[in-house]
Image (tube, rainbow, N blue to C red):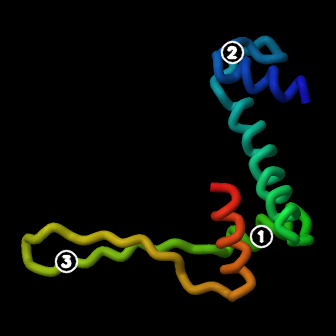
């Protein structure tokens, strides 16, 4: 874990990476890409869900958000609204539980 911490720190500061090349933040993004799913999985497990990280990510990626744009009058300012598409009750509960406990 100390290696991951050092890699993230070096990446954020733009230091030279392990192979001697200039690191432009890619290492930090990769580390975050590995850690964030683990954090979500741990939160889901603590909430009583028993699934693998892959299953959790598969379920969460099926959640879709739509942006609805409504124009009430010609030349008027459009009204934008973001809504989640309908989802299965089990997935809605998972999303709601994680949103309340993570975000």
Q: In this view of the protein, which residue sits in the foreground, 30 or 82? A: 82
Q: Earlier in the sequence, mark 3 or mark 2?
A: 2
Tell me the tag on residue 71.
3
SS for dot 1:
helix
In the image, 23: left or right of 47?
left
Residue 22's tag is 2
Q: Which of the 4 image quarters holds residue 55?
A: bottom right
Q: Residue 90: which quarter of the image?
A: bottom right
Nearest to N terminus: mark 1 or mark 3: 1
Check contact, mark 3 vs mark 2: CB within 8 A: no
Residue located beneath label 1 in the image = 58
x, y percent for residue 16: 73, 12
Real-space CA distance between mark 1 and mark 2, rounded to the nearest whole angstrom: 34 Å
C-beta proximity under 8 Å, tags 1 and 2: no
Q: Is residue 88 above or below residue 26?
A: below
Q: Residues within 10 Å of mark 3 (few under 14, many from 20)?
A: few
Q: Of the residues tagged 1 and 2, which is closer to the observer?
A: 1
8 vs 93: above or below? above
């Amino acid at each position: 874990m100390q290696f991951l911490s050092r890699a993230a720190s070096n990446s954020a500061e733009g230091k030279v990476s392990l192979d001697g090349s200039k690191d432009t933040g890619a290492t930090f993004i990769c580390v975050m890409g590995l850690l964030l799913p683990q954090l979500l999985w741990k939160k889901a497990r603590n909430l009583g869900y028993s699934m693998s990280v892959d299953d959790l990510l598969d379920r969460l990626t099926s959640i879709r958000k739509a942006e609805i744009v409504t124009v009430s009058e010609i030349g008027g300012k459009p009204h934008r609204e973001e809504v989640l598409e309908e989802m299965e009750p089990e997935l809605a509960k998972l999303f709601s539980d994680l949103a309340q406990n993570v975000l």
